Every structure is written in structure tokens, then in C-alpha cells.
């Protein structure tokens, strides 16, 4: 029993438990907090898989920025509303669970056939990460993946402008109280 | 590193399925959105595991790009949910039935 197997068997059940708790919690804030636990466990697994850069990015971007955005929107919409768990389409719940189990079984057999559950020798990852994971990743990112990397900056600008346009409140005349004409 | 890669892939499959179930079972638009995030993260885990399996960094770069796209998607999606809430006073996806036949 070596160290990373122990880490896997500690974090993997915690990750699955947090995901189940997220789906089943009625309160949206509780769901968001369980999702943060799940994101942290996934970050630890990234570390086990030899990617310290994605470990840090996962915590900063997902558990930090994105979850703060989620909580902010939850606060904006009101936290006191409890979600109704009633079924609107009859039999939808059972059908969803059965199809979900089918999906897991399918992927299980695909992995079993493709990789097997054997402990085959993995390639040496220390050679790939020579000079640090961040340096090695930068050489790939700014080498063959340079053009897609630049395109993502356009994507982020477009997303920011789009969100601004969506979130803008249409200003009605009677809403404006600090206009000079309204003050008279 | 002795943990077989298939363990990570199976965990990824389970998390992806839980995300799918969340999308199918929940009615609150915000929780549905969180479930989509869970699915994206499950796929990221699979990508990083593949990167480990093949001994190169392409999978990690793809996971990085997927995080960027997820960030953009969250920003736009949450803006849509906020504007939907302004119109309907509810974040329930059953209420948004304007385009239903």
C-alpha cells in the first residue's frame, strides 16, 4: 500500500459523497458548499496525477472565482427559497437513475476492455515534468498550442461583454431619481 | 505512482453520471448549472489521467483550456439566469416555458 493509493482511497469516496450530497441538498447554498468540497478533492487528485499547476489553477479558478460567482448569484436571487423536489414528469426520477446506472456500467466496461484494471507500468512522468511542471506546460502551451491560447483571450472578452449586456438593467425613466429633470 | 489509471477513469465516470443525474433530477437552474460544472470537472479528471497514461502534457493543456471555456460559460450562464429571474421571479426551469409548444 503506497502513499498515492492511500490518497486516492481517501479522496475518491469523499469526492463521490460530496457530489451525491450536492445533488440531494435542497438549499442552493449547501449545494454550492458541497461542490467546493468536490472541487478540492479533484484538485488533490490532480496533484496525485503529477500536475501541480492544474492543482493550483483548480483551487484558484474553480473553488475561488467560479464558486464565489455562484454564491454571489445565489445571494442575489435570495437564499431563503427552498427547492421543490416534486416530479413534474411522471417516472422521470426512476428513469434518470436507471439510465445513469447504465451509463456507469457502459463506461466501466469500456475502460475494462480498453485499459484493463491491471497495474501496468506507466511511463516515467518525471522526465516529462523536467524543470518543473509549470515550465514544461508553458513549453507546450506557447509552442504547438499558441494559436488556441490566443483565441481563448477573445473568448473571455466576448463572454465578459455578453454577461454585461445580459445583466444590465433597462433604465426606465421613473427609476432614475438623480436626473436633473426628475429633481425639479 | 502505483494507482492504476483505470481507477481515476472510473471515478471520473461516476462523477460524470452524478452530474448527469443532477441535471435530470433538479429543477433549480442554479443547481443544474452546478451539476454541469461537476460534469466538466469529471471530464477534466479523465483528461489529466490520460495525460499521465501517455506520458505527455497534451491532456493537461486540454484540461486547462476546458477550465477557460468553463469560466466563460459560467459567466454567461449566470447572467442568463439572473435576467431570467428578473422576468419570472423564479429560478425554476419549469417556469421558463415561453418557447414550449
Image (cartoon, grey):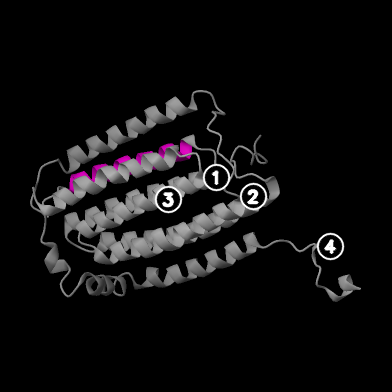
Q: Residue furthest front?
A: A80
Confirm whether the magenta stretch covers residue B7: yes
Q: Crowdedness of circle 4 by 10 Å Cα count: few (<14), some, many (20+)?
A: few
> For the residues carrying marks 2 and 3, which lies nearer the camera in this image?
3
Residue at disc 3, secondary structure: helix
Magenta segment: B5-24
Residue sitting at 81 percent across and 68 percent down? A177
Q: Nearer the viewer, mark 1 or mark 3?
A: 3
Horizontally, is A19 left or right of B56 in the view?
Answer: right
Under tag 4, what secondary structure?
A: helix
Per the image, the residue denoted by label 2 is B84
Tag 3 near tag 4, CB within 8 Å: no
Q: Chain of mark 2?
A: B
- In this view, the mark in front (4 or 2): 4
Which residue in the rendered view is the most extreme toward the top? Answer: A91
Asked if both marks, 1 and 4, belong to the same chain, the answer given is no
Mark 1 or 4: the one toward you: 4
What's the CA distance linking mark 1 and mark 3?
Answer: 16 Å
Distance from the alpha carbon under mark 4 to that under mark 2: 22 Å
**Residue A159 percent coordinates (x, y):** 53, 64
Numbered tag placed on residue B29 in the rendering: 1
Amino acid at each position: 500500500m503506497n502513499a498515492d493509493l492511500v490518497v486516492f482511497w481517501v479522496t475518491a469516496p469523499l469526492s463521490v459523497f460530496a457530489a451525491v450530497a450536492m445533488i440531494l441538498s435542497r438549499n442552493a447554498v449547501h449545494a454550492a458548499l458541497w461542490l467546493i468540497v468536490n472541487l478540492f478533492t479533484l484538485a488533490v487528485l490532480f496533484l496525485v496525477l503529477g500536475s501541480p499547476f492544474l492543482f493550483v489553477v483548480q483551487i484558484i479558478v474553480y473553488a475561488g472565482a467560479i464558486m464565489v460567482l455562484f454564491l454571489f448569484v445565489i445571494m442575489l436571487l435570495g437564499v431563503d427559497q427552498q427547492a421543490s423536489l416534486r416530479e413534474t414528469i411522471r417516472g422521470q426520477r426512476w428513469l434518470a437513475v436507471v439510465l445513469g446506472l447504465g451509463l456507469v456500467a457502459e463506461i466501466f466496461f469500456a475502460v475494462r476492455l480498453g485499459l484493463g484494471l491491471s497495474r501496468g507500468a506507466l511511463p516515467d512522468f518525471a522526465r516529462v515534468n523536467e524543470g518543473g511542471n509549470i515550465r514544461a506546460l508553458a513549453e507546450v502551451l506557447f509552442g504547438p498550442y499558441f494559436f488556441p491560447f490566443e483565441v481563448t483571450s477573445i473568448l473571455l472578452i466576448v463572454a465578459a461583454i455578453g454577461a454585461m449586456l445580459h445583466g444590465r438593467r433597462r433604465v426606465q425613466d421613473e427609476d432614475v431619481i438623480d436626473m436633473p429633470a426628475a429633481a425639479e | 505512482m502505483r494507482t492504476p489509471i483505470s481507477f481515476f477513469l472510473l471515478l471520473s465516470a461516476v462523477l460524470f453520471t452524478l452530474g448527469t443525474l443532477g441535471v435530470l433530477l433538479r429543477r433549480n437552474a442554479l443547481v443544474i448549472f452546478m451539476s454541469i460544472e461537476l460534469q466538466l470537472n469529471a471530464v477534466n479528471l479523465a483528461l489529466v489521467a490520460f495525460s499521465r497514461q501517455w506520458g505527455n502534457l497534451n491532456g493537461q493543456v486540454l484540461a486547462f483550456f476546458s477550465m477557460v471555456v468553463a469560466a466563460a460559460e459560467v459567466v454567461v450562464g449566470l447572467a442568463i439566469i439572473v435576467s431570467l429571474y428578473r422576468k419570472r421571479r423564479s429560478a425554476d426551469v419549469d417556469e421558463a416555458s415561453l418557447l414550449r409548444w
